[in-house]
Image (cartoon, helix red, strand yellow):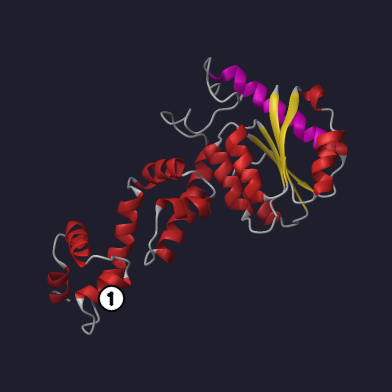
Amino acid sequence: MYRVIIVDDEPVIVRGLSRTVDWEKWNCEVVGTAESGQEGMRLIAEKHPDILFSDISMPGLDGLSMIAAMKSEYAGMQVTILTGFRDFDYAQQAIRLGVTRFLLKPSKMEEIEEAIREMTKRLDEERALRPEGYGKKDGQAGGTAEDLEDGAPDPEEDSAGNFIVKNALSYIEENCTEKLKLADVAEKTYVSQWHLSKLLNRYTGKSFSDLLNHVRIEKAKRLLEDPSLRIGDVAEQVGFLDVAHFSRVFKKQEGISANEYRNRL
């Protein structure tokens, strides 16, 4: 049976979907529910569902980033959004990221069942095309990104991956002077550290540490234009706690020392 998770911060909707839909009719079972986005993400990571019904306008949650994360990390999962957020551009972006249906609250049972019909149809078709044993290690019908590691991403996964990497790079740029770790960026983009590392390598050809160092050195080059700043001051302002480490990274990236770079300005 296909595994279903329902996430919504309105308990009446969670209970309603869980109890009123004839899930067995669609060869489905509800394996978990959550009433917050954070709880929902943890549940998805634990249960690896085939189908997700979720709101995207919940407190403390960036809906589009969550969708991108789910479609990128859990490539085989089918997603239907239930929301009161009436924005056409937002809906279009969600669909480009791989959402199966975007339903406005309050949704009719006919709309919900049509969404289930389409999602189970896609899962049936995907199951028929996948090699034997694909995605079975965690009990799900669809595959995780780990299953797809050696293959080219499909268009939906590619769109989601691009979206995540752009958000990650923006966050690195904005916070490069802090004690930034891969875990911090992964948390902001709603994916695991392992998956974010894979995406960064796939789309940029660089590791997280290389990207962070690149951003810091580019910022350092701008600061070096100010002769009142010592090399140690520049290193500290761009996030390096050790001047010697800063000097090694600068020379590795630019081919010359920070002092030599400043003297050429």
**Nearer to me, 187 or 121:** 187
Q: Give left or right: position of 218 versus 159.
A: left
Residue 50: x, y in percent? 65, 30
Whether 120 is among the magenta residues is yes
Whether 219 is among the magenta residues is no
**Nearer to me, 205 or 4:** 4
Residue 82: x, y in percent? 75, 46
Residue 131: x, y in percent? 52, 17
Q: Is residue 98 visible?
A: no
Q: Residue at x 85, y 34 (%)?
A: 19
Q: Quadrant of residue 228?
A: bottom left
Magenta span covers which residues? 112-130
Q: Give left or right: position of 200 versus 105.
A: left
Q: Quadrant of residue 126?
A: top right
Q: Residues within 10 Å of mark 1 (few under 14, many from 20)?
A: many
Residue identifier under label 1 = 223
Q: Quadrant of residue 117?
A: top right
Q: Quadrant of the N terminus?
A: top right
Q: Give left or right: position of 54 versus 185.
A: right
Q: Residue at x 55, y 20 (%)?
A: 130
Q: Element type at marker 1?
A: helix
Q: Amino acid at mark 1?
A: Leu
